[in-house]
Amino acid sequence: MPELSRFYNIIKMIFNDNLRHHKPHVHVYYNEYTAAIGIDGELLAGSIPVKQLRLVEAWLTIHEDELYAAWNNAVCGIPFGKIEPLR
C-alpha cells in the first residue's frame, strides 16, 4: 500500500478496498490508532483522536480533487503520486 502523504506524525495511505468500504477513502495511522476515513470526511472504520481527525478532515478538504484522482488511479492499478502534506 503506497504512502500518499505524511504530516504531524499522521500517516495516510490510500487503499483500493472499495469492496469493503464502498467509497473512496484513505487509511490513517496515528500512534496505536488506525482508521479508514472517506474522502468526504466520514469515519468508516476504526478510531483516531479528535484533534488528529480534524487535521485529517482539513487535509481532505484542501486536497479533495487530488484525492479523488489518486483513488481513481489506485482502483485501476495505476500508480499515483504523493499529495502535499498539511503544513
Image: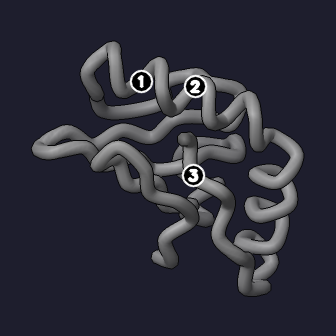
Q: As drawn, which residue projects farthest toward the top?
A: 50
Q: Dot 1 surroundings within 10 Å: few (below 14), some, or many (20 or more)? A: some
Q: Dot 2 surroundings within 10 Å: few (below 14), some, or many (20 or more)? A: some
Residue 85 badge: 3
The residue depicted at 80 percent of the width and 40 percent of the height is 64
Quarter of the view holding residue 59: top right
Q: Dot 3 surroundings within 10 Å: few (below 14), some, or many (20 or more)? A: some
**Mark 1: which amino acid?**
Leu
Decide: is 33 above or below 12: above
Which residue position holds label 1? 53
Question: Between 11 and 18, which is closer to the camera in this rendering?
Answer: 11
Relative to 76, 58 lies left or right? left
Q: Which tag is nearer the camera, tag 2 or tag 3?
A: 3
Residue 57 badge: 2
The residue depicted at 45 percent of the width and 40 percent of the height is 36
Task: Choose the circle earlier in sequence order: 2 or 3.
Answer: 2
Relative to 6, 63 lies left or right? right
Q: Which tag is nearer the camera, tag 3 or tag 1?
A: 3
User: Residue 31: x and y, percent?
Assistant: 15, 45
Relative to 13, 77 lies left or right? right
**Mark 3: which amino acid?**
Pro
Quarter of the view holding residue 77: bottom right
Task: Choose the circle earlier in sequence order: 3 or 1.
Answer: 1
Q: CA distance from mark 3 to mark 1?
A: 15 Å
Q: As drawn, which residue projects farthest toward the left?
A: 32
The residue depicted at 71 percent of the width and 72 percent of the height is 74
Q: Quadrant of the C terminus?
A: top right
**Mark 2: which amino acid?**
Glu
Question: Between 86 and 37, which is closer to the camera in this rendering?
Answer: 86
User: Residue 51: x and y, percent?
Assistant: 34, 17
Question: Between 22 and 79, which is closer to the camera in this rendering?
Answer: 79
